Image (tube, rainbow, N blue to C red):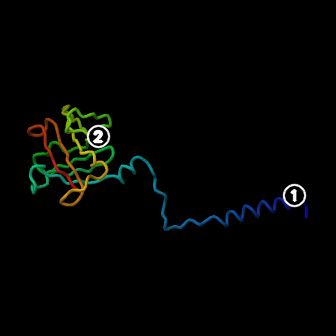
Amino acid sequence: MKASSFRAGAVLLALSGAACSAPAADPADGPDEAVGEESEDLTSSRVFHCRSAYKKSGPEVASIKLTKTRATLTAVGPDLAGVAAVYTYNPSYAPRAASHQGYSQYANTDAFSHKMVLLFDGTMRSGGAALPDGGHGGDVILEGPRISHGILSMLCKR
């Protein structure tokens, strides 16, 4: 046997051994999931059900799906029908009022240049604080010209 054929045989043996030792893909595992901003947004979304903050057992007035970059407000009560929209997170929000320190802002400007704002308690972006009556949630304030009195305070929980 020639030395060159011996080396070629050793290389082929090493390659076939490496291929045999690799674990076979399990079809039950399914395809790999794509990782990106959208999938992060979807996995961290939470739906909160909101009622007026001053009516302890009042009806639900809105539902909010909250993600890292968007808040989708769905009006349940007729008073909020004109403000149902997708609100975008404002990372540069700096509250002027001391009562809003630690809050996050999501805003929406409609076709008539009316700016509506949702202010979330700081814990809401991470799932909300534990509430005394069960569940998780926090305070949400809706501000803007499209609602009566220009402001609505809500208690939202999931």
67 in relation to 10, above or below: above
Quadrant location of the C terminus in the rendered image = bottom left
Instruction: Choose top left, top right, bottom left or bottom right for residue 70.
Output: top left
Which of the numbered marks, if any, corresponds to residue 4? 1
For the view shown, which residue lies furthest in the right direction?
1
Amino acid at dot 1: Ser
Residue placed under numbered mark 2 in the picture: 88
Viewed as shown, does residue 111 lie left or right of 21? Answer: left
* Disc on the earlier residue, 1 or 2: 1
For the N terminus, the quadrant is bottom right
Callout 1: helix, strand or loop? helix
Residue 66 lies, with reference to residue 57, above or below; the image says: above
Residue type at mark 2 is Thr
List x then y, in percent, for residue 32: 49, 58
- Circle 2 crowding by C-alpha within 10 Å: few under 14, some 14–19, many from 20: some
Q: Is residue 55 left or right of residue 8?
A: left
